[in-house]
Image: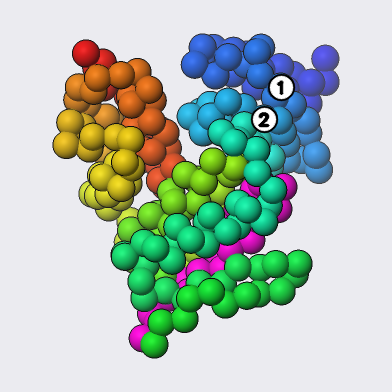
């Protein structure tokens, strides 16, 4: 067995250890490419995607990981429709009212929102159901909220949040907690008042009581949608 074959086997074994990933039931492809580990395929939801990448990174250590793992869309959509939904969500969000918003269509930017006192800018691109956000905003909370809004579009298969923050802002567990709480409050399908959020070393713990398993899962997905979250421990009780 070569060193590369052994590494791939160790990654597969680690993925099988986490039963929440369901590795043998998922079309996840692992391959080595120019020294990096490629993770490709489509998984049921963002929680499986994040846990898979976290597990892979822990095994390969300093080796780069190429993420081509996408999420099955809740509703199949063409790229143009996905872009329109993301655009509308960003423009309608009061917290982003000072941001200039552009959407790229056929390689060209179209300006859709240009406030007089713009203090930030967000560019939207969609390719194969993958939403890429670029630009610059004034706070990490705005960056994280924009990413969650893009994830909420039913056709989104992945969100690459490349938005910069200026002036630079130091991140912290408190910042992540505030962002997760905000996203939960924005989600019309989740009663945020019933959920407590605690973050330690970028690991988000969710606690509380909700009436359905569906709401419990949606709350967890909302936490995973927040940029910078390393893991989510869902202690929410259904009852």
Decide if residue 170 is on the left or right side of residue 47: left
Q: Residue at x 58, y 44 (%)?
A: 156
Q: What range of the chain is rendered magenta?
A: 117-136
Horizontal side of residue 45 vs 228, given as left or right = right
Q: Is residue 200 magenta?
A: no
Which quadrant of the structure image shows residue 218?
Answer: top left
Residue 47 placement (x, y as % from top left) = 48, 29
For disc 2, the marked residue is: 42
Q: Reply above or below: 213 against 198.
A: above
Identified at 28% across, 30% down, the residue is 205
Residue drawn at x 42%, y 74% as measured from the top left: 99
User: Which residue is rendered at x = 71% and y = 74% of the image?
Assistant: 108
- Looking at the image, residue 82 sits to the left or right of residue 217; the answer is right
Q: Residues within 10 Å of mark 1 (few under 14, many from 20)?
A: few
Q: Is residue 193 above or below residue 122?
A: above
Residue 165 seen from this side: no
Quarter where residue 117 is shown: bottom left
Which image quadrant is residue 197 in? top left
Q: Label 1 belongs to which residue?
A: 27
- Residue 128 part of the magenta segment: yes
Residue 39: image tag:
none
Residue 238 in the image: x percent, y percent?
26, 15
- Does residue 217 appear left or right of residue 136 in this picture? left
Q: Position of residue 16 (x, y in %)?
A: 59, 12
Secondary element at tag 1: loop
Q: Are marks 1 and 2 in contact (CB under 8 Å)?
A: yes
How busy is the neighbourhood of tag 2: few (under 14 within 10 Å), some, or many (20 plus)? Answer: some
Q: Secondary structure at mark 2?
A: strand
């Amino acid at each position: 067995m070569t060193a590369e074959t052994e590494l791939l086997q160790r990654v597969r074994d680690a993925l099988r250890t986490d039963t929440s990933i369901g590795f043998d039931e998922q079309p996840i492809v692992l391959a080595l490419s120019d020294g990096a580990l490629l993770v490709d395929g489509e998984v049921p939801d963002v929680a499986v995607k994040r846990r898979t990448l976290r597990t892979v990174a822990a095994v390969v250590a300093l080796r780069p990981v190429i993420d081509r793992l996408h999420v099955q869309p809740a509703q199949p959509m063409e790229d143009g429709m996905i872009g329109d939904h993301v655009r509308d969500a960003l423009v309608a969000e009061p917290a982003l009212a000072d941001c200039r918003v552009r959407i790229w269509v056929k390689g060209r930017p179209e300006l859709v929102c240009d406030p007089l006192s713009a203090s930030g800018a967000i560019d939207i691109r969609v390719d194969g159901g993958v939403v890429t956000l670029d630009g610059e905003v004034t706070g990490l909370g705005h960056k994280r909220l924009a990413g969650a809004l893009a994830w909420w579009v039913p056709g989104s298969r992945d969100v690459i949040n490349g938005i910069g923050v200026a002036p630079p802002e130091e991140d912290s567990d408190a910042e992540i907690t505030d962002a997760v709480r905000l996203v939960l409050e924005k989600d019309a399908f989740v009663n945020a008042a019933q959920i407590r959020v605690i973050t330690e070393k970028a690991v988000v713990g969710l606690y509380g009581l909700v009436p359905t398993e569906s709401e419990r899962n949606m709350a967890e997905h909302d936490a995973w949608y927040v940029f910078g979250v390393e893991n989510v421990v869902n202690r929410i009780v259904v009852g």
